[in-house]
Amino acid sequence: MSSLYINEPLTNGKVLLVTTLGDIDVELWSKEAPLACRNFVQLCLEGYYNDTIFHRIIKDFVAQGGDPSGTGQGGESAFGKTFKDEFHQRLRFVRRGLVAMANGGPNDNGSQFFFTLGRSDELNKKNTIFGKVTGNTVFNMIRFNEILTDKDDRPIGDAPKIIKTEVLSNPFDDIVPRDIKKKVKSEKQSKPKSQSKATKDFSLLSFGEEANEDEEEITRASSSMKIKSSHDVLMDDPKLSTQPAIEDHELEENRRKDEGAGAEGDDTVEDKEFDAEMADKVRDKLKRSAEGKEAQQKDSIEDVFSYNRSKKRKRALQKESALLKKEMLEAKRRREEELRGKKEAAETDRSLLPEAVQDFKAKQDYYRDVKLKGSVREEATMKLLADFRARVLSAKFKKAEDVEDVKIEQPPEQPAAALATSEDWMSHQLVFEDDRIVRAKDVNATASEDTFDIFDPRNPINMRRREENAAPQKKKKTITHNIAM
């Protein structure tokens, strides 16, 4: 097991996940999986994983989370779109405690991730490993195996969730957290206001009759009290004119004109804005359609020209290929004629050679043309050897002892062709005469300067000679020693 940890590269970066099962420390491989680590760190800094549940738990396999919707179908990466997978040869699903990205297919990584609760070789080259759970927090992660799940692998009851995240060591100094505002849907809906007027029912009161009388008096007083102008109040004032400055019909006409002008002015402004907007849209549409037609016309013209060019090019290539083919056939024909002429000349010259040489040349030409290779050539060679062996064994060998006393007459000379084709040599045994001459050593002959004697120390004769030569020298040494005494 220790070898698995030794093969893993060094980590760079650390994140703390505070969950309902306890704290979980995650160390990151930011060099081996930079995109996945940057995505995870940025989402943790922004609080994206806060209050998210682990929606999928499979015992001794994985515990998956990171989806704010809690359904397993949501979640968005920090890049705003999915990013590609990142595989490393030293990061494999060979143990529990690894943190990897969950995806829906190749290069479909978002915000969801999972913890491995056991060995998962089937996930290799499918999911990106970007971190591992370290320290004693591994025991908190193992508690996922105690969660009961339904047939869809969803937790039963309160699902474990991430309370908050904290980046303890940020390997990316250039990450700037975004200001993400979560949209909260209000469950309360505004109630429509009642349009009916409230009425007072004084019959429910013990003093209802008195209350009704008071209400009637207040109503009469309010109806009699009307707002009056200065002419009504100061009718006897001589400073004020008794005639109105503007007649009633003129006042009504001016009022209608003002109202009409106001409405017409409002409609005119709105109409102008609408007309300007529609005119811009129509103008843009016409411009785009004109540009599209022009581009389409250009494309059609270019297509015609390109088709003509390709057609001309095709014809030129066909002519060139036909000429090349014709030249190749002509060269082949000339080469065949040259070879045929050489062969005829060789056959003419070969007819002057002996029959054996002609046979040899013919077989040489045959094997040169066959060009056997590999096992076929080996089989052909072994077949030739077997045929030769059979011919040799079929010949009758004659023993040298049977013809030792018989005087051998020299046969007449035969031409080379007859000797080459004859198989009489197969029935004879090759015997060499013993031409060695034993010469006695001349004792009186003096050795020349170029003659060297070789003495074998192991030879008994040489050993006896050395002993005889050594005995007189030993006696001399003994006599000399006695005299000195």
Image (tube, rainbow, N blue to C red):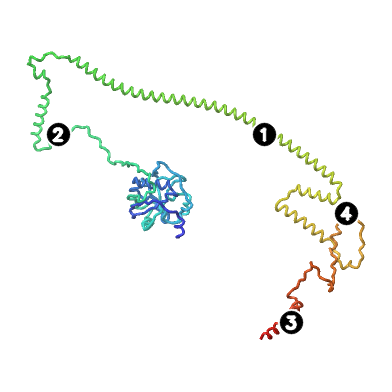
Q: Crowdedness of circle 3 by 10 Å Cα count: few (<14), some, many (20+)?
A: few
Q: Residue at x 35, y 48 (%)?
A: 52
Compared to 21, does 482 lie above or below? below
Closer to the eye: label 4 or 2:
4
Compared to 116, does 232 lie above or below? above
Question: Is the Cβ of the residue at disc 3 closer than 8 Å to that at disc 2?
Answer: no
- In this view, the residue in front, 284 or 329, is 329
User: Which residue is tagged 4?
Assistant: 418
Q: Is residue 330 visible?
A: yes
Q: Is residue 401 left or right of residue 98?
A: right
Q: Residue at x 20, y 14 (%)?
A: 250
Question: Is the Cβ of the residue at disc 4 closer than 8 Å to that at disc 2?
Answer: no
Give the residue type that dot 4 points to: Ala
Quadrant position of the C terminus in the picture: bottom right
Q: Quadrant of residue 83?
A: top left
* Alpha carbon separation for disc pair 2 and 1: 110 Å
Compared to 209, does 233 lie above or below? above
Q: Is residue 151 visible?
A: no
Closer to the eye: label 4 or 3:
3
Q: Earlier in the sequence, mark 3 or mark 2?
A: 2
Where's residue 123, x and y in %? Answer: 46, 51
Give the residue type that dot 3 points to: Pro
Could you say which disc has been placed on residue 472 in the image? 3
Q: Residue at x 69, y 34 (%)?
A: 324
* Dot 2: element: loop
Give the residue type that dot 2 points to: Lys
Give the residue type that dot 1 points to: Ser
User: Which residue is tagged 2?
Assistant: 200
Q: Residue at x 75, y 55 (%)?
A: 381
User: Which residue is tagged 1?
Assistant: 321
* Alpha carbon separation for disc pair 4 and 1: 57 Å
Q: Earlier in the sequence, mark 1 or mark 3?
A: 1
